[in-house]
Image (cartoon, grey):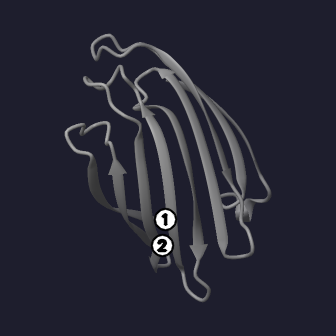
Amino acid sequence: FKHLEAGWFGDWDTRFEENIHVTLWHADERKEAGIPDGWGMQFSFNRRFNTHWLPFLRVGYGDGGGAPLMRSISAGFSYDRPGDDTVLGLGLNWGRPNGDLFDTATDDQYTVEAYAWLQLLPRLAITPDIQLIKNPASNPEDDLIWVAGLRARLSF
């Protein structure tokens, strides 16, 4: 797997909040897994707006290489609540599944995600989230599924 990324951010303190990136990738064939080689690209944009709002956009294109989605567009926003270390967010995604990875023909997949970023301690944050997925590519028997998640970030 090889990738090349070019990007811009305004200054070091806001590098996660205000940035633009373009990534190109290539994956070699994996014969044992039956996955052909492939390539793709991704565009990512974040920009803080009006102090508390952080909209984002992600666009991806893949051609083989084992990528689960061959086309993907994600958009959404986060909102920093004034006076505390909580961030609330909502994201939407459309994706076209990779026919090489899934045995049956699948419809386009749509996802809605709501999440919260909670700073529990100075070096510990958690992010609970809930997703509703329509036409889940990896579960074609169901039209809709719910997925709950919990991520943790420990910095030191």
The structure residue drawn at horizontal position 26% and vertical position 52%, both measured from the top left corner, is 145
Q: Residues within 10 Å of mark 1 (few under 14, many from 20)?
A: few
Q: How far across and down, in percent of the image, does residue 31 sit? A: 32, 10
**Residue found farthest to the right:** 10
Q: Is residue 133 left or right of residue 142?
A: right
Q: Is residue 17 left or right of residue 141?
A: right
Q: Is residue 26 visible?
A: no
Query: What secondary structure is marked by label 2?
Result: loop
User: Residues at badges 1 and 2 in contact (C-beta under 8 Å)?
Assistant: yes
- Up-down relation of residue 67 to residue 36 (above or below): below
Amino acid at dot 1: Ser
Q: How far across and down, in percent of the image, does residue 11 sit? A: 78, 59
Q: How crowded is mark 2: few (under 14 residues within 10 Å), some or many (20 or more)?
A: few
Residue 80 placement: quadrant:
bottom right
Q: How far across and down, in percent of the image, does residue 131 sit? A: 36, 58
Q: Can residue 122 be seen in this view?
A: yes
Q: How far apart are marks 1 and 2 (CA)?
A: 5 Å
Residue underneath mark 2: 123
Near-viewer residue (112 or 117): 112
Q: Is residue 92 left or right of residue 97?
A: right
Near-viewer residue (26 or 123): 26
- Up-down relation of residue 54 to residue 118 (above or below): above
- Up-down relation of residue 96 to residue 143 (above or below): above
State the mark number for residue 155.
1
Near-viewer residue (93 or 49): 93
Earlier residue among tags 1 and 2: 2
The structure residue drawn at horizontal position 67% and vertical position 61%, both measured from the top left corner, is 17
Query: What secondary structure is marked by label 1?
Result: loop
Residue 124 placement: quadrant:
bottom left
